[in-house]
Image (tube, rainbow, N blue to C red):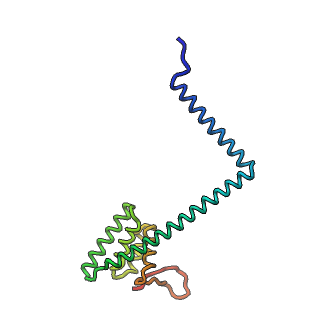
């Protein structure tokens, strides 16, 4: 009985070998063309610049969209209002901080987490101290969004805590 060269394993191995050989041949061809054809190199550079420009434009558009979302969120938070009674403010503060921390741990919606921390900041009696705490405990992306919210709120004024002329770069909030 003669062995057959048409077994499925042999056919599969031959097919895989052909595909790999074709891929390697294309890689060698592409590398040769990249090294020796100046027009091809220029076309690759043009394409690379085009992709980089498109990515930059997309990032700028995304940033503008996020700023609009933040602006809307701050306006909605102000529209809802903030409690005025001391006990209500304390309870509101604790709820918002807990909700913000939970959202940060889940990593689901950074803007929503920043809104929670913003609301807590609005009712906290010493916002300057709270910003220092946030700086140490809140993840940087959420902190950056929170900083944009604070910058967009005219009721919270940010000023330098250092003496005039010094450059320690510390920013705090006026009470």
User: Which residue is located at x 51 percent, y 25 percent?
Assistant: 8
Taking the spot 46% from the left edge, 69% from the top edge, the residue there is 66
User: Depth check: 93 or 167 in front?
Assistant: 93
Q: Residue furthest top?
A: 1
State the residue at coordinates (46%, 72%).
Answer: 67
Q: Horizontal and vertical percent for residue 5?
A: 56, 20
What residue occupies the far bottom of the structure in this picture?
Answer: 164
Image position, residue 17 (x, y; %): 59, 32
Residue 112 in the figure: left or right of residue 1: left
Residue 80 vertical placement versus 141 (above, below): below
Near-viewer residue (164 or 109): 109
Percent position of residue 149, x then y: 43, 75
Query: Whole-percent x and y of residue 80?
Result: 31, 77
Pick the quarter of the image with the C terminus.
Answer: bottom left
> Which quadrant of the figure has residue 51?
bottom right
- In the image: residue 95, left or right of residue 151: left
Q: In the figure, residue 58 lies in which quadrant?
A: bottom right
Task: Name the residue nearer the viewer: 96 or 42.
Answer: 42
Q: Is residue 17 left or right of residue 29?
A: left
Residue at 40% x, 74% y is 72
- How many numbered marks does the figure carry? 0
Against 161, residue 117 (above or below) is: above
């Amino acid at each position: 009985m003669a062995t057959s060269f048409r077994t499925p394993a042999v056919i599969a191995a031959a097919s895989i070998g052909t595909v790999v050989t074709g891929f390697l041949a294309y890689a060698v061809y592409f590398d040769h063309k990249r090294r020796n054809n100046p027009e091809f190199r220029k076309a690759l550079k043009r394409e690379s610049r085009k992709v980089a420009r498109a990515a930059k434009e997309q990032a700028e558009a995304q940033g503008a969209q996020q700023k609009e979302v933040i602006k809307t969120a701050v306006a909605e938070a102000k529209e809802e209002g903030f409690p005025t009674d001391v006990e209500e403010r304390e309870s509101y503060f604790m709820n918002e901080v807990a909700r913000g921390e939970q959202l940060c741990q889940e990593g689901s919606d950074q803007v929503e987490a920043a809104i929670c921390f913003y609301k807590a900041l609005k009712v906290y009696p010493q916002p300057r101290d709270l910003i220092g705490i946030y700086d140490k405990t809140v993840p940087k992306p959420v902190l950056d969004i929170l900083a944009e919210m604070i910058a967009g709120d005219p009721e919270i004024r940010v000023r330098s805590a250092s003496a005039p002329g010094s450059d320690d770069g510390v920013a705090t909030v006026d009470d």
